[in-house]
Image (tube, grey):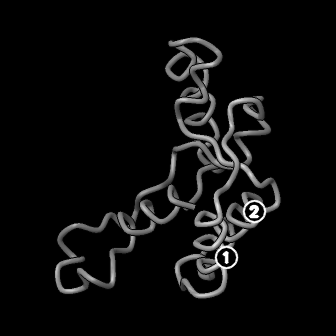
Amino acid sequence: YGFANIYRTLKAGSGNAAHINRFFCVPRAQFLGVTPQDIIDYGLADATHPLSKTDIKRATDAINNDPFFSAHPQWLAAIKQLLEMGVRAEQQALAKWGLNYVIDEYLPRKLADRGGFLP
């Protein structure tokens, strides 16, 4: 859930900084990072980390209480998928395929399917 929380703050701002959000938010941003679906699509199951109790609590709170996630069905589905899988992956997981995998394979595939980005 941490990746989604950080992204949401970048895209929509934070309640604590509401008075300056207009200066720092990037409303047209799209998420290019590792998603729960990427764990499946890129064979990263053996490079994951189990969700901690804190991860699960924050993800559940996001689903139930955060208007950003209820306003973006793709994000809601991704958070639910994360909980169902019970694991998370970080960008470093892609290094299992080699140091150049991100620039040679991952990014070109992601950029070719811009419809697959999370909003």
Circle 1 residues within 10 Å: few <14, some 14–19, many ≥20 = some
Question: Residue drawn 65% across and 15% down?
Answer: 97
Numbered badge on residue 99: none
Circle 2 residues within 10 Å: few <14, some 14–19, many ≥20 = some
Position of residue 82 measured from the top left corner of the image (x, y, whole percent): 72, 57
Question: Residue drawn 55% across and 62% down?
Answer: 119
Q: Count of labels shown?
A: 2
Residues tagged 1 and 2 counted as in contact (Cβ below 8 A): yes
- Vertical side of 63 occupied by 110: above or below: above
* Inter-mark Cα distance, 1 to 2: 8 Å
Residue type at the position of mark 1: Thr
Q: On the rendered structure, is 9 left or right of 39?
A: left
Circle 2 is placed at which residue position?
83
- Vertical side of 49 occupied by 53: above or below: below
In depth, the one of 93 and 55 nearer the eye is 55
Position of residue 33 measured from the top left corner of the image (x, y, whole percent): 53, 44
Which residue is at the far front?
53
Q: Upstream in the sequence, badge 1 or badge 2?
A: 1
- For the N terminus, the image quarter is bottom right
Secondary structure at numbered mark 1: helix
Circle 1 is placed at which residue position?
60
Secondary structure at numbered mark 2: helix
Residue type at the position of mark 2: Leu
Q: On the rendered structure, is 112 left or right of 17?
A: right
Q: Where, by quadrant of the figure, is residue 11 drawn? A: bottom left
Question: Residue drawn 64% across and 50% down?
Answer: 115
Position of residue 66 measured from the top left corner of the image (x, y, whole percent): 54, 83
Q: Where, by quadrant of the figure, is residue 89 drawn? A: top right
In depth, the one of 82 and 52 nearer the eye is 52
Q: Where, by quadrant of the figure, is residue 26 drawn? A: bottom left
